[in-house]
């Protein structure tokens, strides 16, 4: 992904026409397979300044495919009157510096931190071991397994990076599932027992938290099942996943 920033200086008298033109031009961006997302912002301090941010799948996708593709003509026809008012138009690469601010708690903090996740995994694996469908898969599990999975979940949900520091991160985890040939009914049982355990230990049950939590668990278990198949060749090195609130951050009454 590459982010293009275009800064415009638009006289106040032309502002409404400019925003309306971009409203129409945006239809071409929305239709272009090279475009991931876009956003036009207007400066509050000096309202004649606008910044348009467009995320492209790559700089080439923008410059070669979009510009020679079927959506460019309609896009350009709308914005052409404003091209002379461009003050900067450049592609930027994201750096590792990013995150959410303190106004949005991490899912880790919202869940209750390390202690809550430890309680969750202790209760969960207690049920797992007694389960006739998935219990046998865990017959020889390390006695610290619940604590390790709690560290994993904590890191994924925005807590301390302890699984990476103490257990080897993604690299170690992926190897634990290789060759286990997890079936779909086993995956479903794993999910179901975890959700039962979440209720049992009193993890927050607000819709926002549970939707985001279930989203990660659905994603993670599907990956675990796919990676566990005998013919699977998943990447053995990858960054730790980080899961956030998605489209519905927590409801915090003001
Ligand atoms: C979101 C989904 C999942 C997560 C986050 C997860 C996480 C983990 C982690 C972190 C480990 C390695 C622990 C260590 O550091 O030693 C592990 C191992 C393991 N996982 Fe998963 N897992 C998931 C899904 C599943 C599913 C669906 C199954 C099977 C139904 C499964 C079966 C196992 C088994 C058998 C091991 C090895 C346990 C041992 O022998 O110590 N996992 N998992």
Image: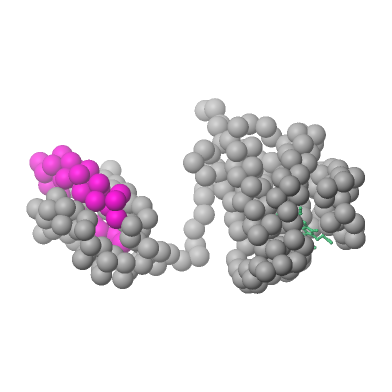
**Occupied quadrant, residue 199:** top right
Q: Is residue 94 magenta?
A: no
Principal secondary structure, stretch drawn in magenta: helix
Viewer-nearest residue: 75 or 154: 75
Percent position of residue 115, x then y: 79, 45
Residue drawn at x 11%, y 44% is 14
| Start-end of magenta stretch | 4-32
Q: Is residue 163 left or right of residue 71?
A: right
Residue drawn at x 77%, y 55% is 149
Res. 15 visible in picture: no
Tell which quarter ligand 1 is in. Answer: bottom right
Q: Is residue 224 left or right of residue 98?
A: right
Reply above or below: 98 against 95.
above
**Occupied quadrant, residue 140:** bottom right
Percent position of residue 3, x then y: 35, 61
Question: Total label count?
Answer: 0
Percent position of residue 135, x then y: 86, 50
Q: Is residue 240 left or right of residue 5?
A: right
Viewer-nearest residue: 149 or 181: 181
Q: Is residue 29 magenta?
A: yes
């Amino acid at each position: 992904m590459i982010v293009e920033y275009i800064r415009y200086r638009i006289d106040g008298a032309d502002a409404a026409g400019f925003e309306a033109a971009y409203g129409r031009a945006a239809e071409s961006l929305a239709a272009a397979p090279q475009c991931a997302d876009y956003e036009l912002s207007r400066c509050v301090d000096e309202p004649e300044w606008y910044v348009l941010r467009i995320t492209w799948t790559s700089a080439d996708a923008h410059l070669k495919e979009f510009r020679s593709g079927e959506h460019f003509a309609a896009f350009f026809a709308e914005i052409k009157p404003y091209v002379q008012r461009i003050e900067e138009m450049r592609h930027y690469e994201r750096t590792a510096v990013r995150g959410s601010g303190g106004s949005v708690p991490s899912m880790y903090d919202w869940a209750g931190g390390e202690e809550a996740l430890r309680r969750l995994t202790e209760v969960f694996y207690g049920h797992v071991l007694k389960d006739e469908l998935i219990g046998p898969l865990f017959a020889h599990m390390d006695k610290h397994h619940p604590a390790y999975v709690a560290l994993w979940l904590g890191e994924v949900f925005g807590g301390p990076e302890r699984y990476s520091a103490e257990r080897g991160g993604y690299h170690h985890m992926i190897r634990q599932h290789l060759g286990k040939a997890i079936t779909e009914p086993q995956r479903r049982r794993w999910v179901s027992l975890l959700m039962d355990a979440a209720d049992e230990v009193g993890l927050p049950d607000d819709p926002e938290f549970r939707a985001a939590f279930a989203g990660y668990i659905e994603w993670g278990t599907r990956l675990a099942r796919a990676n566990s198949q005998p013919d699977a060749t998943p990447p053995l090195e990858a960054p730790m996943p980080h899961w956030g609130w998605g489209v519905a951050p927590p409801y915090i009454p003001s």
